[in-house]
Amino acid sequence: MESIEIWSFEESHRPLLCEMIEASEDFPQTLAYLYRRPGGCNVVFVAEAAGQILGMIDGTFDSDLDHELFDGFPVPDAPHAFITRMHVHESVRSQGVGTGLIWRFAGEAVARRCTFIGGSIGHSSDPGPR
């Protein structure tokens, strides 16, 4: 496979991103509408190779994660980053695409001076190749 690049989402990525999501057997299709329309407050990064979107991660930055999910341990003062959703195409799950997306998101959190990155897993699938 050609080199995988991680990009900040641009409007030109929307058709390819929607194509990947809609073809996925394990992306919750009830959430696909979030990516069909322009706008939204989340920051999205996509992994791309040879003109194909292989994965995505989205979330927010500069927020305050005053949430019961994090009551079990001390969270540093805001700003915080929160990973809302991540999806990697089934065919490339063992090739580091997810790791690259996480690192890109973390790099953005550091650049924005976030002191904590949180997330909540609401849907998961077998991370191994199929």
Image (spheres, rainbow, N blue to C red):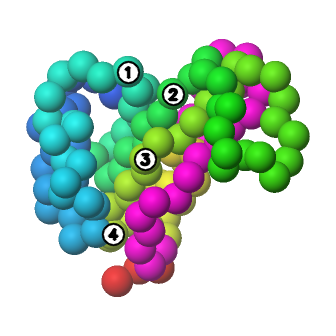
**Residue type marked 3:** Arg
Helix, strand or loop at mark 2: strand
Using the image as rendered, state which of residue 62 and residue 57 is in the foreground. Answer: 62
- Above or below, 102 relative to 30: above
Instruction: Identify which residue is drawn at 48% across, 34% down.
Output: 59
Q: SS for tag 4?
A: helix
In magenta, the rendered stretch is 103-127
Q: Which residue is mark 3?
A: 85
From the top left corner, tell me how far across and down residue 87 is, in percent. 38, 55
Which mark is drawn over residue 41? 1
Whole-Å distance between the Cαs marked 4 and 3? 16 Å
Name the mark on residue 60.
2
The part of the image, by quadrant, that contains residue 102 is: top right
Identified by mark 2, the residue type is Thr
User: What is the x, y in percent for residue 114?
Assistant: 71, 23
Q: Quick check: is 117 in the magenta stretch? A: yes
Q: Distance of mark 2 from mark 3, alpha carbons?
A: 10 Å
Cα distance in 3D space between marks 2 and 4: 25 Å
Task: Please name which of the two marks, 4 or 3, marks the residue nearer to the observer.
Answer: 3
Magenta stretch: includes residue 65? no
